[in-house]
């Protein structure tokens, strides 16, 4: 990569709200990564090993918390791909949100341009999780892309045995979504 290209590339953390081995959300995240246009450089940012948030631990924070916070501070953008648990976000995702938001006054999410993709086998497309997550992102000062919204329902029938997306209209939509997010990241650069 030439030097000017390297300067323009945008490090995008993709956070998956499910730890399940065959997670549809993770499959969807991999599809989004494969469809990312330049200058986006997306990579899954793992959250499964983060110890559960406990404010008492802030005196000597777990190494995994410090590493996660430092990775967040290095991002130019973040995409959340999440299922819905009981009409909200899964605990593993909320834990990552909380870990990144602390200690008080040192919110590592601050000003990272973001986007939300909610995923469900059902027809309501995890609308509840999508909007509960957006509620936290407002408070955390993550400028979150408004349009296009991404509510992906019926995911159980969207992948083949190798995790390839077999639904062309969804692929077209996701491509447009990633193109819009590339514009969003450039429009709201974190370093301004
Ligand atoms: C604890 C729990 C709660 C759930 N609640 C909802 C829900 O509120 N809405 C929904 O659409 N699906 C719900 N589901 C079903 C999930 O959407 C489904 O298990 C999905 O495959 C999880 O995402 P994943 O494939 O990325 O792991 C729930 C599943 C679990 C395990």
Image (spheres, rainbow, N blue to C red):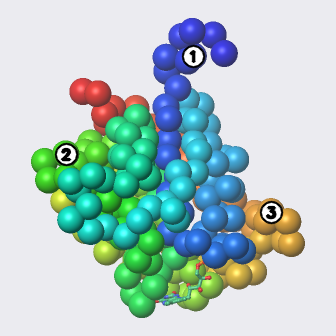
Q: Is residue 87 above or below residue 89?
A: below
Looking at the image, the residue that sits furthest to the front is 60
Q: Is residue 185 left or right of residue 36?
A: left
Instruction: Say which quadrant the C terminus sits in.
Output: top left
Per the image, label 1 sits on a secondary structure element best described as helix
Alpha carbon of mark 1 to alpha carbon of mark 3: how far?
A: 29 Å
Ligand 1 location (quadrant): bottom right
Instruction: Kindly identify which residue carries mark 1.
Output: 5
| Residue 10 in the image: above or below residue 101 | above
For the N terminus, the image quarter is: top right
Instruction: Reply above or below: 39 against 53.
Output: above
- 80 left or right, relative to 111: right
Foreground mark, 2 or 1? 2
Q: Residues within 10 Å of mark 1 (few under 14, many from 20)?
A: few
- Determine crowd level at label 2: few under 14, some 14-19, many 20+ residues with C-alpha closer than 10 A: few
Residue at (44, 72) in percent of width and height: 92
- The earlier-in-sequence mark between 2 and 3 is 2
Picture coordinates of residue 91, whole percent (x, y) = 41, 77
Residue 51, horizontal then vertical, whole percent? 41, 65
Q: Position of residue 188 (x, y in %)?
A: 31, 36
Q: State the mark number for residue 106.
A: 2
Give the percent coordinates (x, y) of residue 166. 80, 67
Looking at the picture, tell me which residue is in the foreground, 154 or 192. Answer: 192
* Residue found at the far left of this picture: 105
- Contact flag, marks 2 and 3 (Cβ < 8 Å): no
- Element marked by disc 3: loop
Q: Could you tell me which residue is drawn at 69 percent across and 64 percent down?
A: 27
């Amino acid at each position: 990569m030439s030097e000017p290209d390297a300067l323009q590339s945008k490090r995008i953390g993709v956070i998956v709200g499910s730890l399940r081995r065959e997670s549809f959300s993770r499959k969807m995240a991999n599809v989004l990564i494969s469809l990312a246009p330049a200058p986006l450089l997306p990579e899954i940012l793992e959250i499964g090993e983060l110890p559960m948030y406990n404010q008492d631990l802030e005196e000597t924070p777990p190494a995994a918390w410090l590493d996660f916070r430092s990775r967040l501070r290095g991002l130019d953008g973040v995409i959340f791909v999440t299922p819905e648990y009981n009409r909200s976000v899964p605990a593993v995702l909320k834990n990552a949100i909380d870990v990144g938001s602390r200690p008080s006054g040192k919110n590592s999410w601050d000003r990272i341009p973001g986007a939300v993709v909610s995923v469900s086998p059902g027809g309501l497309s995890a609308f509840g999780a999508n909007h509960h997550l957006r509620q936290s992102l407002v408070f955390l000062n993550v400028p979150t892309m408004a349009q296009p919204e991404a509510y992906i329902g019926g995911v159980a029938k969207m992948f083949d045995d190798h995790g390839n997306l077999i639904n062309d209209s969804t692929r077209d939509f996701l491509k447009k979504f990633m193109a819009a997010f590339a514009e969003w990241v450039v429009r709201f650069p974190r370093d301004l």
